Amino acid sequence: MIMGNQAIALGALCAGVNLAAGYPGTPSSEIIEFIAKYRKETGAYVEWSVNEKAAVEVAAGTSYAGGRTLVTMKQVGLNVASDPVMCLSYVGVKGGMVIVSADDPGPISSQTEQDTRHFASYSKLPCFDPSTPKEAFEMVQAAFEYSEKYHTPVLLRPTTRVDHAYQSMEIPSLPKAKEIAGFEKDSKRWVIFPRASFLNHQKIFERNLVTLPEDFSKSKFNYIEENGHPDGKKGIAASGISWEYVKEALSLIEAEHEGSTKNLTLMKIGTPYPFPEPTARDFLEKAQEVLVVEELDPILEDSLIYVAGKNHLPNTILGKNTGHIARAGENTVASVKEAIESFLGIEQTKEDSKADEIPPLPVRPPVLCAGCPHRASFYAVKQAMKKEKTVYCGDIGCYTLGNAAPLDMCDTCLCMGADITMAQGFFHAEPDRKCFSFIGDSTFFASGITGVVNAVYNQAKITLCILDNSTTAMTGHQPHPGTGLTMMGNAVEKISMEKILEAVGVSPVITVDAFNLKETVEAVKKASEAESVSAVIFKGPCIAIAQKLGFKAQAKMLVDDSKCIGCKKCISELGCPAITFSTDTKKALIEKSLCTGCTLCSQVCPVKAIVSEGGDK
Ligand code: SF4
Ligand code: SF4
């Protein structure tokens, strides 16, 4: 069994990829990690770049030299990478370049539900949309071929359910990475002068309007299924995971209402841009009334409306625009089945009604883990800033969870790095407000440094809180420049955040142990009084990997019932999931299996009722 992201990685390895670079982001993160496992066997170079823009630019260098490159990111990462991606579209590549931008319908773990297929047409890059891990494996290899055939980067946009799905596949033997032909100097080709862009724009337009739609119509990834009845008057078009939902829903409907789906004509679209127009025209000539099943935006639907209009075809096209498919969020087999039943005029089955009766699962909001250093850091700032007029600008990472009660320490969260720059905006609007920004160590390197330079240069008075847990925790503990490890397996000099901050003029820069409450509160007070940009670096390892990072396990804490006065301060102020309250004894309780022995609660308890199991705290 292989995961979708591993299948994408495997496809790239089978294509002889020379370089893979990316920035971690759910649901795409496992691709780089899988390629790294095979770096020695194949000779591929692998890196976690500091951000998506850097990853694309690193890949561009290798592609210009003739090597094959894979760049991975989640959909919002494509916004960060958009500058080089847009330019590469005009300049082109020599060695094949495939950019994986994983979309997140729901969204499940993203800020937005943006659709990479829009970005494909905006940037004029061909786009593949896999339905299964196996198809993703095949598409990556095809994408490299198309990339080299048309000298353009190619997008692959899996969605979460494809990235994280498992499918059984035979693992092929892996070839060595391709021989690299080498860079040939040619400034007319590789320097993006306005005249060159003008000329290339015309070629790209022609390619996307005529050549690729025809080429893609011959591709095995776009096809029509006539279900044995070539004169079916109704049809369904789908792509990505929605195609699998359609197939499963149809087999369920057919089992319940034999013969009801026989007249349907289906169209599977694997290349949403450029749209395979000749195939789509054939489909629309066969099916007069069409239901389009897709997630995120109505890209296929709009494309089919365009093809129908262009060819004067009298089709009725239903989908998101008409409210027949949900306009936001994920599709499911059940939702697609319901939409198809309605499209076919079939009444809801008893089973469906029963399914509706199943009570929903209890809501379990995400919380910071027991023993998470971020809880201690947020608590320290909150204590230090009691009665002050403040704003707490958050960022993307585990620490966004600092917004939850009882901490309530994240007033804003926009996008990577925006905590620092937004705090500046608050300062310029309200100079009497204490403006704080909270950023993680990985995000600091990805998108924070330029914001700090901007703040110092433009003389903002803000306090930067770096929550340094020595990893990129939220996406699966990837290394970053502050960890001293690379994806090639090398231990390198750690890049010091303190030195960067001091070098650009941040003062003071105070580094503290996140779990020493007295020390952290004092540091925050001192930093907040500075008349310039100040910083507190809260050091505390992510508890999920603390021991792997070499930190000793701490003795767990327990509540001494003879001392506890039942004030609930440890619960109502911290929100550590390891602490509960006994309604029988009216005392706090610590769940031993969850407690990491971080000691924060013992520093908060007013009567010192929380002690170490070893008795020395
Ligand atoms: S803060 Fe201390 S006294 Fe209050 S409930 Fe918790 S353990 Fe008991
Ligand atoms: S020491 Fe206290 S705050 Fe830390 S994990 Fe254990 S119960 Fe939670």
Image: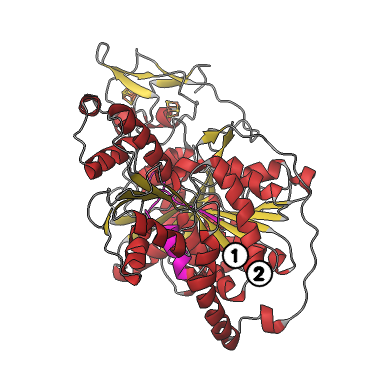
Q: Is residue 437 above or below residue 402?
A: below
Q: Are marks 2 and 1 in contact (CB under 8 Å)?
A: yes
Q: CA distance from mark 2 to mark 1?
A: 7 Å
Residue 117 in magenta stretch: yes
The reply to whether residue 15 is in sight is: yes
Q: Amino acid at mark 1?
A: Pro
On the image, the x and y values in percent for residue 376 come to 43, 39
What residue do we see at 57% from left, 62% from top?
Answer: 154
Image quarter hosting the N terminus:
top right
Question: Which residue bears the numbered disc 2?
Answer: 93
Which residue is at 28% across, 52% downward? 327
* Amino acid type at mark 2: Val
Mark 1 highlights which residue?
153
Q: Nearer the viewer, residue 176 or 135?
A: 135
- Helix, strand, or loop for circle 2? loop
Say if 6 sits above or below 233 in the image. Answer: above
Q: Is residue 418 visible?
A: no
Quadrant in which residue 322 is drawn = bottom left
Q: Ligand 2 appears in which quadrant? A: top left
Residue placed most toward the observer, 444 or 365: 365
Secondary structure, mark 1, is loop
Mark 1 crowd level (few <14, some 14–19, many ≥20, 10 Å Cα): many
Q: Position of residue 65 (x, y in %)?
A: 75, 68
Colour pattern: secondary structure
Residue in front for this viewpoint, 568 or 351: 351
Name the quadrant containing residue 553: top right
| Count of all numbered marks drawn on residues in the image | 2
For residue 340, above or below residue 224: above
Residue 209 is inside the magenta segment:
no
- Which x, y percent locates residue 411? 31, 52
Q: Which residues are magenta?
A: 100-122
